[in-house]
Amino acid sequence: MTERQFQYTTVHPFSVGMPIINIRLSHHEREISVPALIDSGSALNILPYDYGLKLGFNWDEQQFRLPVGGVLQGAEAYAVLAKCVIDSFFPIDLAFAWVNRPSKEICALLGQINFFQHFRVTFEAYNSIFRIEQIRLQ
């Protein structure tokens, strides 16, 4: 598989960068491009509420409720599936916890379930870079 290298993104008010990458998400005929934080400490991929609406998800029609923790403790969340394209890698299906918090309050997260089941990520914060390798194709 091909490995790609990316620069950390500086996020105000922090002086250090974060492993943020632009991803393209699609669901049926809708597609959006959003920044996402690669977070090895997150159990789930997280999708902010407004991003889900732009993809055409309907909150009132969701049936698979998910428990979320950490800073999202107590927030409502539902499982949704979206096609994801990262850089020049092959498209994959990612399962997200679609959370009733807007992108102004939380960012999209790529976590253990199921981003890290498709990609190997190496973080080099001391060099402000991270590398991604696609290890599992669908």
Image: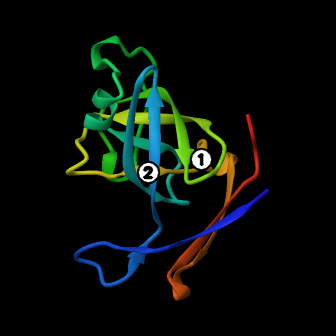
The CA distance from mark 2 to mark 1 is 9 Å
Q: Percent from the top left, x then y, of residue 123?
A: 59, 73
Q: Which residue sits at x=64%, y=49%? A: 89
Q: Residue 41 carries which label?
A: none
Q: Which quarter shows the C terminus?
A: top right
Which of 20/97 is in front? Answer: 20
Q: Percent from the top left, x then y, of residue 53?
A: 28, 28
Residue positioned most to the bottom: 126
Does residue 29 appear to the left or right of 83 in the view shown?
left
Q: Which quarter shows the N terminus?
A: bottom right
Q: Percent from the top left, x then y, of residue 82?
A: 50, 30
Does residue 62 appear to the left or right of 40 in the view shown?
left
Residue of label 1: 115
Which of 33/44 is in front? Answer: 33
Residue 52 sits in quarter: top left
Q: Residue 109 carries which label?
A: 2
Q: Which amino acid does label 1 sit on?
A: Phe
Q: Which residue sits at x=34%, y=11%? A: 61
Residue 11 sits in quarter: bottom left
Q: Image height check: is 135 above or below 11?
A: above
